[in-house]
Image (cartoon, helix red, strand yellow):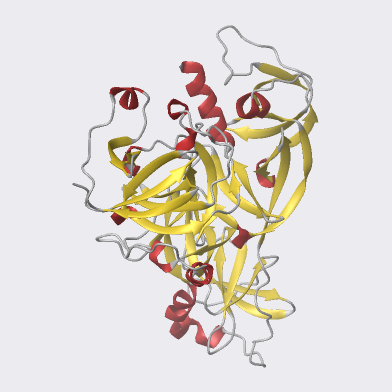
């Protein structure tokens, strides 16, 4: 007997999932296709402020279902690996009293994530086990905390939940990344010049300037004695004090429940760009030093200490077209763009290995996005030269679009081998490709 299954229809077939695994049922929205995804994976979709992989049950060829009709609903599930969504045409309530039967041998042979079946109102219903769904490369599961089952949340409730988020400034210092809370943050600026202060504590680097105002610069994070990089200025009772960091990577917005504290860890961590990084309180770091440096903080008038609130942090991306789709690369990762002059195929190559090409006398390996993503090899196009592993790789696309300046809080990190992030541009979700992952996928395909 079933313990509670939510049933839904998709493409003319009927399916069911355990009601306890359902986080919410939301109205279908925009979907972004990601590279290397298998046929049953539509891509990623934004649901309730989270990016989740979207699986279409009608995408399994063995079922022979009609995939052309757009599913009106997303059934969001909790799985042992995180959250994912199933595309559905409509739901038909919860079944609790249907006897379950084993799936047919053909179902197992086709690799379907089906663990049981049952008859309901004369219709054969397949029970999907979310833990058995393979989403493949190009997508990533999203953490979702355990919570009460929510079916059919009204739109305003989803908006309310997504608005409850924390903004963190991601920086690099001393060879590691750190996410700083932005409470009390005044501004972030590049360090142009530092004037040392005699007899100051070791943590003090000296005095710098921001908008013609003196700002005390301290370095409690790296301890390397460097005077370059960026200053992250916070408000104190004495005046502005800035933390020195090596680099600023952008702003991320996360739900509080996505910041976790592991046993024995001194503080919280959060996932960023495929790894977990520590979360620090910048204002607290400054206040902990205030007793030692209070006499060095220059007095400034005005409630805002003469500094305006921080401007939005932006990141730049180069967008390229591949068939009818758009992809992006971080501008900092792009060495140059050249006209593509064709490749020399090598023996034993596959569709995931495109051979070599010549650029200004140098021989470079080729990653042709047209061959991998849309399976339409072309000899013409553009090659974006990017550094990978100490060398240079030519990433080939149909055409260059433009360099886009995107607010950092519109960039969502993806924990995935081939996709570094997803950015929101003109209302669309655009994958940001990870060059190292593309090369690794080619090598894996070639080895296969």
The quadrant of the rendering that contains the C terminus is top left
Q: Is residue 80 above or below residue 260?
A: above
In percent of width and height, residue 267 lies at 34, 66
Q: Is residue 97 above or below residue 389?
A: below
276 relative to 206, above or below: above
On the picture, is 8 further left or further right than 237? Answer: left
Of residue 116 and residue 204, the one placed in the foreground of this image is: 116
Q: Position of residue 90 (x, y in %)?
A: 47, 51
Look at the image and tell me whether residue 46 can be seen: yes
Seen as rendered, the residue at the extreme front is 122
Q: Residue at x 54, y 32 (%)?
A: 36
Residue 7 relative to residue 358: left or right: left
Q: Residue furthest top?
A: 347
Query: How many numbered badges does the structure rendering display?
Result: 0
Q: Residue at x 78, y 42 (%)?
A: 401
Q: Position of residue 347 (x, y in %)?
A: 59, 6
Residue 335 makes an appearance in the image: no
Q: Quadrant of residue 197?
A: bottom right
Q: Which image quadrant for residue 350?
A: top right
Name the residue nearer the viewer: 49 or 95.
95
Depth order, front residue of 283/357: 357
Q: Is residue 158 left or right of residue 110?
A: right
Considering only vertical position in the picture, is 402 above or below 161? above
């Amino acid at each position: 007997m079933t313990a509670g299954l939510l049933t839904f229809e998709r493409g003319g077939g009927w399916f069911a999932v355990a009601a306890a695994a359902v986080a919410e049922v939301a109205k279908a929205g925009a979907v972004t296709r990601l590279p290397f995804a298998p046929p049953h994976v539509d891509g990623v979709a934004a649901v309730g402020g989270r990016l989740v992989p979207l699986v279409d049950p009608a995408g399994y060829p063995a079922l022979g279902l009609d995939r052309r009709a757009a599913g009106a609903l997303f059934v969001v599930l909790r799985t042992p690996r995180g959250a994912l969504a199933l595309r559905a045409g409509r739901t038909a309530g919860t079944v609790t009293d249907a006897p379950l039967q084993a799936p047919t041998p053909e179902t197992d042979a086709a690799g379907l994530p089906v663990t049981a079946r049952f008859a309901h109102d004369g219709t054969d219903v397949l029970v999907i086990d979310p833990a058995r769904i393979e989403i493949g490369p190009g997508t990533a599961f999203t953490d979702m905390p355990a919570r009460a089952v929510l079916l059919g949340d009204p739109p305003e409730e989803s908006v309310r939940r997504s608005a409850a988020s924390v903004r963190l400034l991601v920086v690099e210092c001393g060879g590691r990344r750190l996410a700083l809370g932005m409470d009390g943050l005044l501004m972030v600026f590049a360090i142009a010049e530092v004037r040392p202060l005699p007899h100051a504590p070791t943590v003090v680097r000296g005095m710098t300037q921001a908008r013609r105002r003196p700002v005390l610069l301290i370095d409690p994070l790296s301890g390397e004695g460097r005077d370059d990089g960026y200053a992250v200025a916070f408000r104190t009772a004495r005046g502005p004090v800035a933390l020195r960091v090596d680099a600023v990577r952008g702003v991320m917005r996360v739900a509080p429940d996505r910041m976790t504290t592991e046993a024995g860890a001194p503080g919280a961590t959060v996932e960023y760009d495929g790894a977990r990084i520590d979360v620090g309180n910048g204002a607290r770091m400054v206040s902990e030093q205030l007793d030692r440096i209070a006499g060095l903080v220059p007095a400034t008038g005005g409630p805002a200490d003469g500094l305006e609130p921080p401007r939005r942090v932006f990141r730049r991306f180069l967008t390229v077209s591949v068939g009818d789709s758009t992809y992006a690369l971080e501008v900092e990762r792009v060495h140059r763009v050249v006209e593509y002059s064709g490749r020399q195929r090598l023996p034993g190559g596959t569709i995931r290995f495109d051979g070599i090409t010549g650029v200004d006398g140098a021989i470079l390996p080729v990653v042709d996005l047209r061959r991998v993503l849309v399976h339409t090899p072309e000899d013409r196009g553009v090659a974006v030269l990017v550094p990978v592993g100490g060398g240079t790789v030519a990433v080939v696309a149909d055409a260059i679009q433009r360099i886009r300046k995107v607010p950092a809080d519109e960039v969502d990190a993806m924990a995935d081998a081939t996709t570094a992030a997803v950015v929101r541009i003109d209302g669309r979700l655009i994958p940001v490709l990870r060059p190292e992952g593309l090369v690794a996928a080619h090598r894996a395909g070639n080895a296969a």
